[in-house]
Amino acid sequence: MDATMPDVTEVGTEWRVLDGVATAWFDAPSLIEGAALAGRIVKLSAQIAVDVRVTGIRVRLDSDEHAEAVSAAARDLDLAANPAALQHLSVVLESANPSAVRPFWQRALDYAPGEDGGLVDPLRRDPAIRLRRSTEPRPLRNRIHLDVVRPAVAVEQAGLGEAYGAYGVCHADPDGNEVDLVPGDPLGEKSGTSDWQAVFSAMACYRTTSPTQQSDLAAAAAALADDTGFPLLVDLRPGLVILDSGKDQWVDDAHGLELDFTDLAAHLQSAARDLGATADPTLPRFAQLFLDAADVAAVRTFWVAALGYTPDRRDWNTDIVDPRRLNPVLVFQEIDTSETERRRQRNRIHVELAVPSDLAQTRLAATLAAGGRLLDESEGRWRVADPEGNELVIVGG
């Protein structure tokens, strides 16, 4: 562990260090209780990342000095920590020349340079891109690629050149790693939802000018969503509140509620404007991982177990999702078994999953029991292949 990282023993038993950040999850019975804790946290420091969900709240600290104060606030609200809920997923791209592919992905995702030479989401919502040097020859098409959805004007400004593929949205970096960069749309035609973008998720990002304004907007959004039973995602970042439906959840058959989400979106927009928050239409972004598989059922079963995900409620949909909607969606599509060479080759893209160090062996065992094959291991790291060779690296926090 780096000397600058907070030590678990220093920040309390509720906290774990994941990807170099002291992180905790506190179970909560509703969005309202989670938003109440979030309101207290943002007044401690604007730099703490807070994600409010219908089942609880994730907190990622800027400094371990705030750990005890956050824990005390949670105890005061009778919210208990649950370290077993913690995990953090990132994407690793291997390249013979990382500096050549970095600008492509920075433009595609609108990411910022990371301390390790990779790229990170400035909003700390979507998965980091880690770049690793590799001397392996460039393969045929990877069986893993990214889907990224951004507002149409942002897609145009990314300047990735002419797209290709069946939907005209695919681009490749200099090594041939692919991204589907999809332009989003406004959420409906009503003026009451003009702050919202449909980027697979329905999303509105509001700039705030004070911790009180931020706290009040989170509380108002939680109350409106709870009143309808909708599991809204409410993320708090420095000077920002992000309201998000989750992928496809604004569509009627996804949430299964007697609810037109655009009505809820209009109420949320009205509440945000009443509080003086200002929408930033350039910020919405959605990112997911696409895996090609000859045997979708077997590969999907592996990833459900490895990541602790759940299948989408719709039988026709191959998506698997983080039950807390904190990590990216994985989508599976079938490829022809005749693509023997492509199926046999090693991908240049793989997934890295950080879990608390005291839970790493349990997660590894579940992954192997679901059809995984251990390729190699080093201290605190296990590289595992799914039934068709797609790789996952499990990292003990």
Image (cartoon, rainbow, N blue to C red):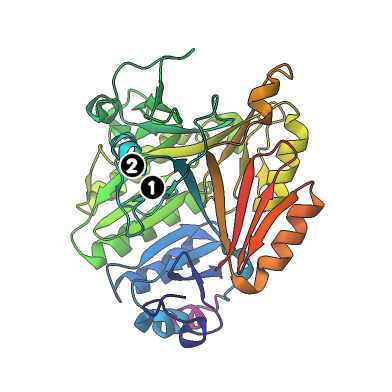
Amino acid, disc 1: Leu
**Residue at left 59%, top 49%?**
322
User: Is residue 106 something one can see in this rendering?
Assistant: yes
The disc label shown at residue 243, or none:
1
The disc label shown at residue 211, or none:
none
User: Is residue 257 something one can see in this rendering?
Assistant: no
Vertical arrangement, residue 276 with respect to residue 61, above or below: above
Q: What percent of the width, then of the height, locates residue 250?
A: 50, 35
Q: Is residue 78 magenta?
A: yes
Q: Residues within 10 Å of mark 1 (few under 14, many from 20)?
A: many
Q: Spatial distance from mark 1 to mark 2, Cα to Cα?
A: 5 Å
**Residue at left 54%, top 63%?**
56
Choose the circle earlier in sequence order: 1 or 2. 2
Q: Is residue 48 magenta?
A: no
Mark 2 residue element: strand
The magenta region covers: 73-79
Residue beneath disc 2: 204
Vertical arrangement, residue 353 with respect to residue 41, above or below: above
- Looking at the figure, which quarter contains the C terminus? bottom right
Q: What percent of the width, then of the height, locates residue 360?
A: 66, 66
